[in-house]
Image (cartoon, grey):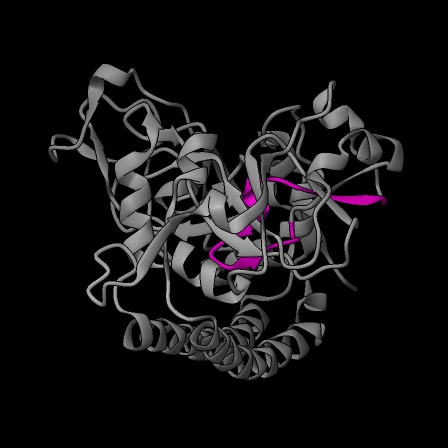
Amino acid sequence: MKKYVTLGEVCRINMGQSPDSSTYNKNGEGIPFYQGNADFGEMYPITRHWCTIPTKVVEKGDILVSVRAPIGALNIATEHCCIGRGLAAITVNSDMVSRNYIWYLLKSKVSMLQSLGTGSTFKAINKNVLNELCFQLSSLTEQDKISMTLKKVDLIIRNCTEILGGLDLLIKSQFVEMFGDPIDNPNGWNVKPLKELSSLITNGNTPKGGSENYIDNGVTFLRSQNIWRNKIDLSDVVYIDEITHRKMQKSSVRYKDILITKTGRVNTENSSLGRAALFLGKDGTANINGHVYLVRLNNSVVPEYVVTILTGEAYRKYIRKVCVGGIDKRQINLDQVEDFPIILPPIEQQNQFADFVKTIDKSKFDVQLLIKNIRRVKFYDQF
């Protein structure tokens, strides 16, 4: 007979709490302090701050869960540390469950946890959501077998992801070989501001009432968390109705528009400020909120060429230099986007580069399809 338990019955859940700002620093004084998902690495957190008077501490080996958007991201604590309110720590009862089993359980429940998030600005889950998470409890031997299978699946996906990274690097290398650094411009190409190469540069709007306008199905409404480096991620997408969409026709997105994040953090590995992606959907099927810029290029430049410039490391440094705002969270103003300097080699060379990108994208699609097919297999049904 199958036995079901809740997470709270087999684990201790410790919700984070931010210490007084006067007690944390970047000088290595005290114990590591992780505020939220921004401090996460692939498996283990990256220490950027320390705390001398921690309020909530966790131990080495505890599973760290992001309880604020993006809800459900996971890491493992590598040492005694302090966590802020963006995280929760889970300590397993090793007599009943293995840490690996709980790790994969939580991975399997990310979509469900995200659906339970509440809040108008940033979605979040509370302790009760984690406490009441129900799952099938197998024997420790069976848990180990399940965990080993899922670990092998993870390894295959990780290898595929590394291949994708290598293909992205090929594109960057080809760009530098053909055009050089787009900021230093060693080849002396003609340079024009982005506004002279565009028919439209605008930002979107956040409808009055915010998340109250979101519906289950409708027009895709893209926010900054959906825009990554030349990738539009729809895992946390929301929708608006046609009436709201028509009221915001100026920011209705068309095929091969470039979308750029307007605000975000700069001191993280995946800096959320100034990320850019090419929209490849149908005209009029999406809109953008007030934290995203839309750039519609004219025929004097090739979109694949321009978005490669905007997503390169040289431009990342340039954006950090020109952005405005606080120490960490900053903004790019509209006039700064309009003045982005773009080097202009002959259009024939831009098209040659775009053809190369399309060839690489075909290889990327094949690898991504493999990952998708692996994930489609219902490994997680065992929970």
Q: Looking at the figure, which quarter contains the N terminus?
A: bottom right
Residue drawn at (47%, 80%) of the image: 352
Q: Position of residue 357 (x, y in %)?
A: 50, 76
Residue 226 is one of the magenta-drawn residues: yes
Q: Is 145 or 227 nearer to us in this picture? A: 227
Q: How many marks?
A: 0
Decide if residue 336 is on the left or right side of residue 5: left
Question: Percent position (x, y) of residue 280?
Answer: 67, 62
- Image point 27% across, 24% down: which residue? 54
x then y, percent, for residue 62: 39, 47
Q: Is residue 195 left or right of residue 269?
A: right
Is residue 259 visible in this depiction of the protein? yes
Residue 142, quarter of the rendered image: bottom right
| Residue nearer the viewer, 71 or 11 | 71
The region drawn magenta spans 217-235
Query: For this rendering, which residue is in front, 105 or 303?
Result: 303
Q: Is residue 196 left or right of residue 279?
A: left
Say which quadrant the C terminus sits in.
bottom right
Q: Is residue 285 above or below residue 167?
A: above
